Amino acid sequence: MRHLSDLEMASVLAAKVPGVLATIDDEGFPYLTPIWFVHHEGHGVIMTSTTGRPHIRHIRRDPGAGFVVDLEGNPDSGGRPNVQVKARGHAILEPDHAAWTRRITRKYGGSERLAAERADTPRLAIILQPERLIGVAAGPRSNGAWWTSHPAISPVR
């Protein structure tokens, strides 16, 4: 296993795959939500959601949260190659005035029409301000950058 560079972490965070938001449910157990997101330097990991969702209720009660993006490689080459970027910190809820929802929708290839439809629904921005980001590569090819050819990765420069 090796740690990812800042540029490698930026590439993983820019991938067109959902992240997983971890909150604590009402009984004290982890609650995992696959969710679209963007990473914005200086802001953290930004997601949006509608107000009635369980993870919104959890954050209102306890803002401690975790987040991970995980990319898997082809196991046919032996082992289980993967890269992950993880974060933990406190989540802040703010009204989303459509800007984040539109940006997130476009990241995942959504049309302007879809971005406008999603933005018309009242949403909250979930801003996870990580204590730090941790990126790791594991598996038999962890010293290479096999994952840069993953279909969800676009080069970050």
Image (tube, rainbow, N blue to C red):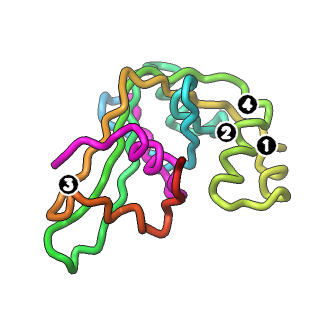
Would you call the spot at circle 3 few (<14 residues within 10 Å), some (14-19), or many (20 or more)?
A: some
Q: Is residue 88 left or right of residue 77?
A: right
The residue pinned by badge 3 equals 138
Residue type for callout 1: Thr
Question: Which sits earlier in the primary sequence, circle 2 or circle 4?
Answer: 2
Q: For the residues marked 3 and 4, what is the alpha-carbon distance in whole angstroms?
A: 36 Å
Q: Residue at x 25, y 51 (%)?
A: 137
| Discs 1/3, front | 3
Tags 3 and 4 touching, CB below 8 Å: no
**Residue 17 tag number:** none
Q: Which one is in front in this view, the residue at disc 4 or the one at disc 1?
A: 4
Quickly name the residue at label 1: 121
Image: magenta residue range = 1-26
Report, in whole angstroms, how far the alpha carbon at label 4 lies from the one at label 1: 10 Å
Mark pair 1, 3: CA separation: 40 Å
The amino acid beneath tag 2 is Thr
Task: Give the number of the disc on residue 50.
Answer: 2
Kindly identify the amino acid type of the residue bearing the numbered disc 3: Ala
